Structure formats: C-alpha cells, structure tokens
Image (cartoon, grey):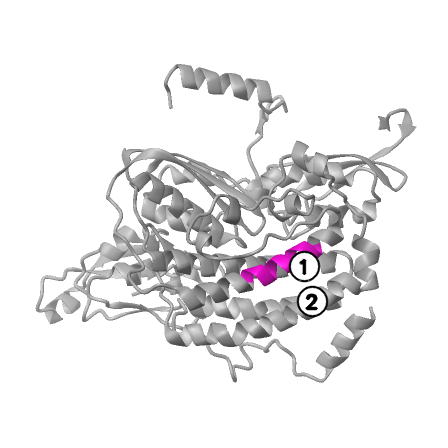
C-alpha cells in the first residue's frame, strides 16, 4: 500500500491485546519503523448493555451498570445511582455520600496502581510491575473488608449504600493508609528516577494542550496536557465539596508525565479518604426510593480514567426508556491515535496504554451487511440531522 | 535500574506474597462481609419468593416442596428457593431483601465443579 508516494506497509496491531488484555484493533501505516497513520477499529467487545438496560428495573440495573467496567465498576454504578437519584429527587444521607467518596477514592488507588503496573509491563520492566501490584493488594484488601468483594463491590443502592463503616474497619484503614503512603513514595521514586522508565516514557506519545483540546480528552490524560479540569473540584458531587485536595497537572503531555501525575493523584486520594474517615457524620446510610420514576437526567462523575457520563430517561416506569453510557476511554481514544504518529512501532503499546484504555466500556456498534460486506457508520452531519428531526417531532 | 535492583534484593529475603492455594490455606482468611457460598435456613424460610423477584441475575427459582417436606411444615410454606450458583453474581441482594433473614452469604468459596448441575443448591 502506498501512502504519500513513499513505500509504506499497513499492519494490524491487535485485536489480540494491543496494550492491556482487551481486544481492539489499531490499523497502522508504517514507513520503515515509523508510524505515519493510525486508525482504531472498535466493536470487538460490544455487549449490548445499553439495550439490555431497557429490560431491567432500576434496582437490578445497578448490578448491570457495575459490570460495564471491571476496574471502575464503582464509578459506573455510583454514576448510575446518582442519575436515578436526580430523577427521583431523592436526598441521599450524608453518611452514605461520605462512604461513596471513600470507595470511589479506594477505586482510584487500585485503578491507578494497576495501570502503573501494566505500563511497567508494557515497557518490559516486569520487576516494577510485580512490586506495584503487590502494594495494590493493600488497597484490594481494604475494599474487600469494607464492601465484601475485591471487584464488583455491590456497594451502592438507589438512595444510599449497603455497607456501613464500623470502628474495626476504620481502625484497619488507619493502619493501612500510612503504610500505603510509604510504599507510594518508593513507587514514585522509581517511576521518576529509574533509567528504564525515563528511556521508554520520556518524550513518548506527547499530547499537546492543543491536541488535547481538539480531541476532547478527559481525566488524567487531560490533566497531563495542562488542562486543569477535575469534576470532583469543578462540579462537586457526593460529598467532595467538604474535602480539601489538590488537582495535580503537568504541561509535558508525555507518557512519563502521566505516570508521575497519576501517582501524585494517589496521595490526594489517600488524603481524601483520611479526611472522610475523620469527619464522617453519623446517621442513616439509605433513603427509600419511589417505586416508579419519570424524567431525564445526565449524571457525570470523575472516574479514575476520566469523565464518566450516563444519560437516563424514565417514563412513568421502573425500567428506563433509554440509558446511554460514555466511558472515559471513548473520549480519550482519538488523542491516543493522533499521538502514535511519528513514533516507532515498539512504542505503540506504551502510547496506547498511556491513556489507561478500557475497550469493553468503549465499544459501540458498526452495522455490517453480511451479504454485501457494506459497513455503515453515521457521520457527524447525519447524527446532527437525526437529532434535529427527533427534537422537532417531539419524539424525546 | 539500581533502585529496582535494591528493591528486588530486599524482597528476595522475604517470603512470597502469593499462597499456593488450595494446597496451602494457612493464614488465609476472608473478611466477614465476604459474599460467598449461600446458606439457606429452610426451617426459617417462609417461601415468600421475594429473593427470586429481586435477584438481578435471575438465578433463584421457587420450587414446590416435596410431600415429605410439606408434612413437616406447620405453616403455609409451599415453595422453597433454589440457587443456581453457576450463574450467580454473588451481589448479596437476596440476603438484603429476605424478610426473615434466612439467607446468609458465608465467607466460604463454592468449590469448582465439572458439572454445572451440581451447583444448583437449596
């Protein structure tokens, strides 16, 4: 295949695990070792969750929403619960809000530590990978003690949470969190100073502020490209307005700055958990929701990977008329693809992994006619026209 | 690299973090809130089918009691819940909604089975 009249080759990276252990294809055009063009091909793990949601009642949907993502399961479940609570005009007890903050921050800790480990594995630094994952077990144990499970915590219910904080669990947190902070110091030292990390990550996959703005990135990817935006501070939800914390940013935009930025975020997460443990109010952890719901809501939440978006539409029923989910990776994927251009093939997994992608949360449909092989995707203009038509005809 | 080597040497002197489960179980414990194998107190159960209605994974079916079991009952209970653990998501909703607290998700892990039919328990 020719690209710009120079001899070039097209190769497929994936669908077998291009970066993390999830299927996605990146069609890459290379000239020699250099990437000149990259296109992502979505759709390998489409699960039809949004359609399935239309047949579940809102209580059972909590557990489906939780299974959108295996790593930020709490973020999806809490965001869904938040959306339903907005529709039901339900006020969640303060203690439940604090408990949600604690679990959300624990999830950020485990997600970021997992990602640092995966990145170390991608650059061939398996010693660091295993050491980080060993420390991550401290967080997993805390999650298990508080919620009853390591993943898919089942912590939320509509109107509150299911598990309360006991004095013994609080004591356990107080013992483990200083230890974790100590371990983080060590992880940060290795991440910043180790020659392998520097050689493979510094100056690699740079996403400039302009590119970040053009591709609408969110979360740590945006903050590493000097976009100072965090929903926890800028559009507070749960009880985040009660805590003081910093939002680390960086102006470099490369993979190394994302490693350091995520580790810095973890210190803030530990600080938020400690503040929450000290100031958690007494009281109920659950408010009873109504039996039927009517209304629409948009719910946003700062998941470990970025902004998590849920749209819910209930029409005098227990099951939603429409549920729409946009996971952070969907917003960040375009920037990864643009960042690949100009780098070597060996850097592709590192750059793809740098945005902490979660492809099964992201995958959407592509209509393929099996008889003709014709593929159909709606353009931006077509989508806009459909939107205008639906709005004018009052179909919503 | 030097930092990682120092860390590696420190860890060389320690015991492995992982345990060779299920051959070694010493020192292993699960928290009391762990949601594992279901234990149902069928004596206490009133057969209201609330657990079956609320189960998000639709794994609980209400099965009629056998004549022998019926003869033992003094109340109006005619059915009992049966759990298909092969499809269970261990969310604990059945435990939460039970009005007589007869369902308990213990901190035991269900044993693996070759035949999924063996995982249907009451």
Q: Is residue A383 above or below residue A239?
A: above
* Rendered location of residue A18, percent (x, y): 71, 47
Q: Identify the residue at horizontal 40%, vertical 76% (top origin).
A: A168
Are discs 1 and 2 located on one and the same chain? Answer: yes
Q: Can residue A113 be seen in this view?
A: yes
Q: Is residue B105 above or below residue A295?
A: below
Q: In which quarter of the image is residue B115?
A: bottom left
Instruction: Between residue A206 and residue A387, name the one nearer to us.
Output: A206
Q: Does the magenta stretch include residue A50?
A: no
What span is colored magenta in the figure? A259-269
Secondary structure found at label 1: helix
Looking at the image, residue A349 sits to the left or right of residue A71; the answer is: right
1 or 2: tag closer to the N-terminus: 1
* Rendered location of residue B96, percent (x, y): 29, 61
Q: Do the residues labelled 1 and 2 touch (CB within 8 Å)?
A: yes
- Tell me which secondary structure the magenta stretch mostly adopts: helix
Q: Return the chain for callout 2.
A: A
Q: Identify the residue at horizontal 56%, vertical 46% (top origin).
A: A230
Q: In this view, does A289 lie above or below A331?
A: below
Residue at which label 1 appears: A116
* Rendered location of residue B53, percent (x, y): 26, 51
Instruction: Between residue A43 and residue A172, name the one nearer to us.
Output: A172
Residue at which label 2 appears: A187
Of circles 1 and 2, which is in front?
2
In space, the residues marked 1 and 2 are separated at their CA atoms by: 9 Å
Looking at the image, residue B80 sits to the left or right of residue A51; the answer is: left
> In which quadrant is the N terminus of chain A drawn?
top right
Res A27 label: none
Looking at the image, residue A184 sits to the left or right of residue A85; the answer is: right
- Disc 1: CA contacts within 10 A as few (<14), some (14-19) or many (>=20): many
* Rendered location of residue A382, percent (x, y): 56, 18
Secondary structure found at label 2: helix
């Amino acid at each position: 295949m020719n690209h710009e009249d120079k001899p070039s080759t097209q190769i497929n990276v994936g669908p077998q695990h291009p970066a993390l252990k999830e299927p996605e294809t990146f069609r890459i055009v290379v000239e020699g070792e250099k990437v000149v063009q990259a296109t992502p091909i979505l759709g390998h793990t489409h699960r039809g969750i949004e359609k399935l949601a239309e047949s579940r009642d809102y209580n059972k949907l909590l557990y489906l929403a939780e299974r959108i993502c295996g790593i930020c399961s709490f973020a999806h479940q809490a965001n869904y619960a938040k959306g339903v609570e907005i529709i039901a005009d339900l006020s969640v007890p303060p203690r439940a809000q604090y408990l949600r903050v604690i679990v959300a921050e624990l999830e950020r800790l485990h997600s970021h530590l997992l990602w640092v480990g995966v990145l170390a594995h991608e650059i061939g630094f398996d010693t660091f990978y295993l050491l980080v994952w060993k420390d991550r077990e401290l967080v997993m144990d805390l999650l298990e003690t508080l919620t009853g499970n390591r993943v898919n915590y089942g912590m939320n219910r509509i109107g509150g949470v299911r598990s309360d904080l006991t004095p013994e669990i609080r004591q356990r947190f107080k013992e483990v969190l200083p230890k974790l902070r100590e371990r983080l110091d060590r992880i940060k030292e290795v991440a910043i100073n180790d020659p392998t990390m520097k050689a493979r990550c510094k100056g690699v996959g740079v996403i400039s502020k302009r590119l970040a703005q053009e591709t609408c990135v969110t979360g740590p990817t945006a903050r590493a490209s000097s976009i100072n935006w965090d929903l926890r501070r800028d559009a507070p939800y749960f009880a985040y307005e009660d805590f003081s914390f910093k939002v680390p940013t960086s102006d470099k935009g490369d993979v190394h700055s994302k490693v350091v930025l995520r580790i810095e975020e973890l210190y803030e997460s530990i600080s938020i958990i400690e503040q929450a443990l000290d100031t958690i109010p007494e009281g109920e952890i659950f408010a009873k929701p109504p039996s039927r719901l009517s209304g629409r809501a948009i719910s946003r939440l700062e998941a470990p990977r970025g902004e998590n978006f849920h749209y819910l539409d209930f029409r005098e029923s227990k099951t939603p008329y429409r549920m729409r989910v946009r996971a952070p990776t969907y917003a960040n994927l375009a920037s990864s693809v643009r960042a690949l251009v100009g780098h070597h093939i060996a850097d592709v997994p590192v750059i793809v992994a740098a945005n902490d992608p979660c492809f099964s949360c992201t995958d959407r449909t592509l209509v393929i006619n099996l008889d003709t092989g014709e593929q159909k995707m709606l353009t931006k203009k077509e989508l806009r026209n459909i939107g205008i038509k639906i709005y004018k005809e009052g179909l919503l | 690299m030097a930092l990682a080597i120092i860390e590696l040497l420190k860890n060389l002197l320690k015991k492995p973090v992982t345990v060779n489960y299920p051959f070694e179980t010493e020192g292993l414990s699960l928290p009391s809130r762990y949601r594992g194998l279901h234990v149902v107190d069928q004596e206490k159960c009133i057969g209201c089918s609330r657990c079956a209605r609320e189960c998000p994974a639709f794994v609980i079916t209400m099965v009629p009691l056998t004549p022998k079991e019926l003869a033992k009952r003094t109340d109006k209970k005619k059915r009992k819940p049966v759990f298909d653990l092969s499809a269970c998501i261990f969310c604990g909703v059945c435990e939460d909604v039970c009005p007589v607290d007869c369902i308990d998700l213990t901190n035991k892990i269900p044993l693996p089975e070759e035949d999924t039919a063996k995982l249907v328990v009451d």
